[in-house]
Amino acid sequence: MDQPEPLQGAKRAWRRAGLAAGGIIALAALALTALPSRIPQPLRIAPPAPSANSVRPAPIRLPATPGHFLPFVCEPAFGEHKFWDPLFVAPLGEDRTTLLVVERSGTVQAIRRNDQGDFSRSAFLNLESQTVLTAFRAGEGLLGLALHPEFSRQTSPHRGEVFAFYVGRSEQGLVCRLSRFRTFPGQLDRVDPATEEILIDQLDHHQAHNAGSLAFGPDGFLYVAVGDDANDGPNSHAQQIGRDLFSGVLRIDVDRRGGTISHAPPRQPATGKTAGYLIPSDNPFVGEPDALEEFYAIGLRNPWRMSFDRKSGKLYVSDPGDKSREEINLVEKGSNCGWGDWEGTLENRTAPASSARRGIPTPPLFEYTRDFAHRCVIGGYVYRGPSFPELQGQYVYADQSGRIYALELLDEGTRAGENRLIAMLPEPGIGISSLGEDVDGELYFCLIGKLASETGSVYRLRKTAPTERDAMPPTLADTGLFLDESASTPHPRLTPFEVNTPLWSDGADKRRWIAPPPDKQVTLKEDGQLDIPAGAVFVKHFALATDRRRPEQLRPLETRVLICSPGGDVFGASYRWSADGHETRIVNFNEEEVIECVDGQGRPAQQTWMYPGRFECLLCHNDASGHILGFSLKQLDRDVPCPGGESLHQFEVLSLNGVISPADAALARSTPRQPLAPLHDATASLEDRVRSYLHVNCSVCHNPERQFAAFDARFLHPIPYTGIVNGPAYHAGPPGPNTRIIRPGDLEHSMIYLRMSSSVPESRMPPLGSTVVDAQAAAVIAEWIQSLPPDRTAAPPVTHVEEVRDNFRR
């Protein structure tokens, strides 16, 4: 499962961001003129005292717990059981009481349900000793499993046969391996690892895009999904079927029927070895002298999951995108799904013009735009279970982000109809990794919590009960948070606050408030962190100066509301303002608007604004980030302007407003710490300003709890312990092997700078909800990079997961 690819070419990025000769000066100038500066607003010292004739405002009307606005919810399928990066669920043959859960670490767990509904687990297969896992590579490990269709048949010679696809070792190096195993004699609940028979050993050159999905078709043949080996473009494995077993779907006869049905492979892969199976004689490339006849379909990037419709027998394959498209393919014999000449229906202009074309051109059955919030499609199943008649015959699939969809299938499954979001996982974690189904066709959803740890879960669908319906008010006026329609007069319970380093929000003006629940306050914990009580409400209002010459004239865009729930999580919604600024409505699903603007020279311009849906909030306000981002000691430690021209420390202002007790406020102010430094504060060191910016804008993803990236953007440790300076840049791309997270003195090979300054949306960071380059930040970071001596910091060594696996698991 992939992260967004890096910028394609340092010099091209330089030009796109306007950073040729003198570019840093241009960026600094742009930062000062293109977007309005924040207009300081005096904060009140204490809540207004009610007069004798004042009318008591209505209470704030917000739910205490999150409701559901989708038809289904996800609930744990196996109670409290957790798994090590779960990647697949399958039934144990015809056993209705036992399901198998594939763990990326190399194990398969058998989960049994007793008559009381309780679950127990035991090891079905253990390949930990031969499974390879390296740091930050979610595409390695045990990736796929399939039981022979006659696994449970008493008289079958294939009884107890199991097939596994994993990344292992050979004398030549790492390999993508397909093996056959058998269970111990007389039992079907435990596989004997000593029975391994290797069918395919394909040299794994790049340790990613390994695919690994396995499925037996209605014809009894085994189908094997293989990735393109993650070559940077132009991709040398895509559209090639004569060298190695990459970038497509293979179809092999593991029963070795022979005769007119199948025959021996006429040749071996260039960097691989095969044995123990035959080639179906009706495979589409049989007889072509330069072809590996195992190929059934080609032109797939990383076909992570595939499945057969148990009613129609059609094969559906999902293919995660590169930069632009996520796609679901209806794959037939000889299909060429386009990669790397095409990504979905978009032409891939990096593909070599002379590459050979084979097979039948097959556009996606369905595709959608890839971005930070919608990434890595996870193929599912045509639902045929008995529990949810309203889903019958629809293709239920997921996105790594945690969304679950139902795609209507028309014309006997050959054309896509309506696509509906039907459920979302309660906690995204790293994301949904796979779907699975049981004997009856009911669906299961695998979630990776923290990568390379036993924090994963398996969920199943349940219909939303009437008592669980969404209770978020449909408009901002219905919340009672403001006393007027323009949101200029907040409810007396709302206390404004400011932060040292604001999140970049495309130049928008932002105002912030907090409302603790009645009779409760924010307290200071023993570890020096703030403890925010359940029921606390945070409000952030966004407005934009559409005429850059008049920054004081602001158009309201949205008002976001975040509520702390009793379980320690958060939930909320954004309310979008109408263009005339008179009405609001809740945004359930992400939206975008192209806003007509006037630049600093009076010329017409446009700016795209992204309105987050209900689920997008949780992408940043997650468990790893502490849920509440801006209300922290490092952010609040500052003096703020108050009426009359005086300034007070913000902790004192919060105390006067009853948000925090006077004792805790005094203790918080006296606690030694280093507050975050504003980007424009010339009195702070250049490094502190840069690190403060990275902490706010990047650390919700780039920290050890959340992401594959090998650096820590949090402002917690000295630079040598973060992997930022001289840290390896995975997916370095065209800038070359010398690219680092930050390379001292070298902007062209510093990935953070390249991605921050890029105007290419699919390459730029931070990606979520932003369409405008933060030019001032890019200029300051460029200045810092150029100030670093070449030997400033050596990156810490990358730890191999296999070396610390025991610490995770035991």
Image (cartoon, grey):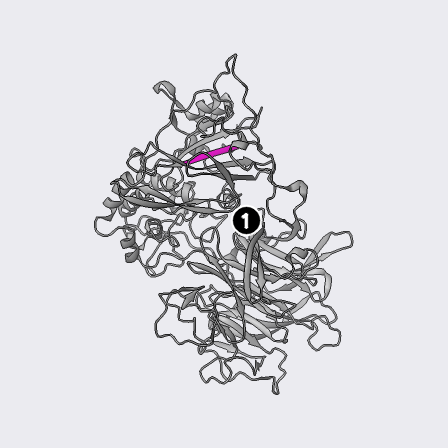
58 in relation to 333, above or below: above
Indicate left or right for 399 with 270 as reference.
right
Q: Quadrant of residue 145?
A: bottom right
- Relative depth, front residue between 427 and 595: 595
Is residue 778 toward the left or the right of residue 107 in the image?
A: left
Q: Residues within 10 Å of mark 1 (few under 14, many from 20)?
A: many
Residue most extreme to the bottom: 259
Q: Which quarter of the figure has residue 147?
A: bottom right
| Percent of width and height locating residue 249 | 52, 72
Residue 607 in the image: state x and y as whole percent. 36, 45
Q: Nearer the viewer, residue 799 or 217?
A: 217
Queried whether the magenta region covers residue 1, the answer comes back as no
Residue to which mark 1 is pinned: 428
On the image, the x and y values in percent for residue 66 come to 59, 39
Tag 1's secondary structure?
Answer: loop
Q: Residue 16, percent across and down?
A: 29, 53
Is residue 526 visible to us here? no
Residue 10 is left or right of residue 313, and the answer is: left
Magenta residues (range): 537-542
